Amino acid sequence: QVQLVQSGAEVKKPGASVKVSCKASGYTFTSYGISWVRQAPGQGLEWMGWISAYNGNTNYAQKLQGRVTMTTDTSTSTAYMELRSLRSDDTAVYYCASTGSGWEFDYWGQGTLVTVSS
Amino acid sequence: SSELTQDPAVSVALGQTVRITCQGDSLRSYYASWYQQKPGQAPVLVIYGKNNRPSGIPDRFSGSSSGNTASLTITGAQAEDEADYYCNSRDSSGNSRVFGGGTKLTVL
């Protein structure tokens, strides 16, 4: 069965960086993209961006351009999301999701809580 | 503010039919996908494309679209359908994705 397993919770200070991992299993990793979605406490879902696991092409949300980098390691079927210059409003649960050809987010990781606090 | 607009809250009596809507200019050209999220859990895909349900999603969930509005219909709502529902589609530029603000569904 398809599984996306994310790395554990992080606590970071403002200005620091965080890198969240998402290990995929149960499907051919390079056949789908990976999207990243975050959810601030008590708020809705926010799409952060997408990476093709096939060729590494990326598409980032405009508001995060310059602060976010998404990468993949096909040898380990793992996707990564790095967010730099963290601010308090980056505090959120971060999700990875496999992304089908129609841009549907088929399967989701369990989420990673990132807390930004001084 | 989101480029996709959803009603913040909707309620339905047990066993009745409810429609959750999502409005936005991009929906004139692109389909929406729909996600169900229960407290403390990751979202789950329930509808995508014209009206496709992933394996395991009950057939009481269906999707439709007209003009700038996409709809998720639950026919015969069950207590376990109480959740937040989010639509997702392209943004107005067509180059990016955006979620609606979400609709909290209460089953009475």
Image (cartoon, coloured by chain):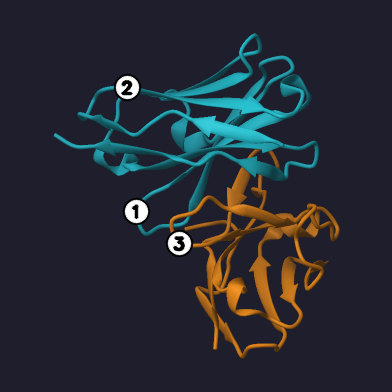
Q: Position of residue B57 (x, y in %)?
A: 75, 60
What's the chain of the residue with tag 3? B
Mark closer to the observer (3, 1): 3
Residue B39, labelled with which disc? 3
Mark closer to the observer (2, 3): 3
Total of numbered circles in the picture? 3
Q: Residues within 10 Å of mark 1 (few under 14, many from 20)?
A: few
Q: From the rendered image, report the letter of the chain displayed in cyan.
A: A
Circle 1: residue type: Pro
Query: Regarding mark 1 in the picture, which secondary structure is present there?
Result: loop
Residue A41, labelled with which disc? 1
The answer to whether tags 1 and 2 share a subunit is: yes
How far apart in space, not on screen, are marks 2 and 3 (Cα)? 28 Å
Q: Residues within 10 Å of mark 3 (few under 14, many from 20)?
A: few
The answer to whether tags 2 and 3 share a subunit is: no
Q: Position of residue B87 (x, y in %)?
A: 64, 59
Who is closer to the viewer here, A54 or B89?
A54
Q: Position of residue B38 (x, y in %)?
A: 51, 62
Who is closer to the viewer here, A7 or B62?
A7
Residue B78 appears in the figure: yes
Residue B33 appears in the figure: no
